C-alpha cells in the first residue's frame, strides 16, 4: 500500500505546473524513496509469484526467430522454443533509470 501511495504522490508532484524549490526537493526525496520501495517490492513480493510470458509474447518470439532463421539460411524449418519463459520485474529499463533525472530536469 505504501508503494501505491508513494507512486501516486510522485506522479502528482511530477505533474505540477509550477514548482518551487520546496516541491522539487520533495520530488527528489520521493524519487529516492520510490526507487527503494520498487527494489523492495521486486525482492520481496515479486519473488513470491511465478510469472510467465503471455501467449502472444511466445507467438511473437517464435515469429521473430523464424524471420531471423529465414534471413540467415533458406534451408528447412527452424526449431524455435514454444515453451513459455519465466518473466520477472525488470527495473533496469530506461523508463525507471530516467526517473532519477526528472527533478533536475524541471
Image (cartoon, helix red, strand yellow):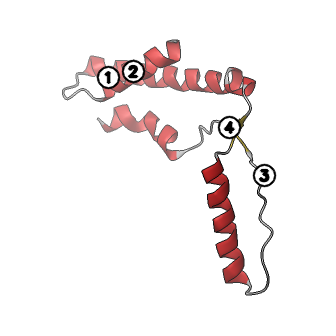
In the figure, 36 relative to 73: above or below?
A: above
Mark 3 to mark 4 CA distance (whole Å): 16 Å
Disc 4 on helix, strand or loop?
A: loop
Disc 1 from disc 4: Cα separation: 27 Å
How crowded pointer 2 is (Cα within 10 Å; few <14, some 14-19, many 20+) is rated as few
- Read off the residue under disc 1: 12
Q: Are marks 1 and 4 in contact (CB under 8 Å)?
A: no
Residue 75 coordinates in the image, percent (x, y)? 78, 86
Q: Residues within 10 Å of mark 4 (few under 14, many from 20)?
A: some
Sequence-wise, the earlier of marks 2 and 4 is 2
Say whether disc 3 or disc 4 marks the residue closer to the N-terminus. Answer: 3
The circle drawn on residue 8 is: 2
Q: If the image is split into quadrants, where does the C terminus sit?
A: top left
Image coordinates for residue 16, horizontal then vertical, percent? 24, 26
Q: Which residue is mark 3?
A: 83
Camera-side residue: 36 or 61? 61
Residue contact between numbered discs 2 and 1, judged by CB atoms under 8 Å: yes
Q: How far across and how far down the image is residue 68, in percent?
A: 67, 74
Q: From the viewer's perspective, is 8 left or right of 87?
A: left
Q: Secondary structure at mark 2?
A: helix
Q: Classify 72 as above or below 56.
A: below
Amino acid at each position: 500500500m505504501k508503494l501505491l501511495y508513494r507512486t501516486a504522490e510522485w506522479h502528482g508532484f511530477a505533474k505540477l505546473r509550477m514548482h518551487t524549490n520546496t516541491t522539487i526537493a520533495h520530488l527528489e526525496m520521493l524519487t529516492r524513496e520510490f526507487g527503494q520501495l520498487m527494489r523492495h517490492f521486486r525482492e520481496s513480493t515479486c519473488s513470491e509469484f511465478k510469472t510467465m510470458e503471455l501467449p502472444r509474447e511466445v507467438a511473437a518470439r517464435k515469429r521473430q526467430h523464424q524471420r531471423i532463421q529465414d534471413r540467415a539460411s533458406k534451408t528447412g524449418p527452424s526449431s524455435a522454443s514454444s515453451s513459455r519463459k519465466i518473466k520477472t520485474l525488470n527495473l533496469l529499463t530506461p523508463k525507471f533509470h530516467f526517473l532519477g533525472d526528472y527533478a533536475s530536469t524541471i
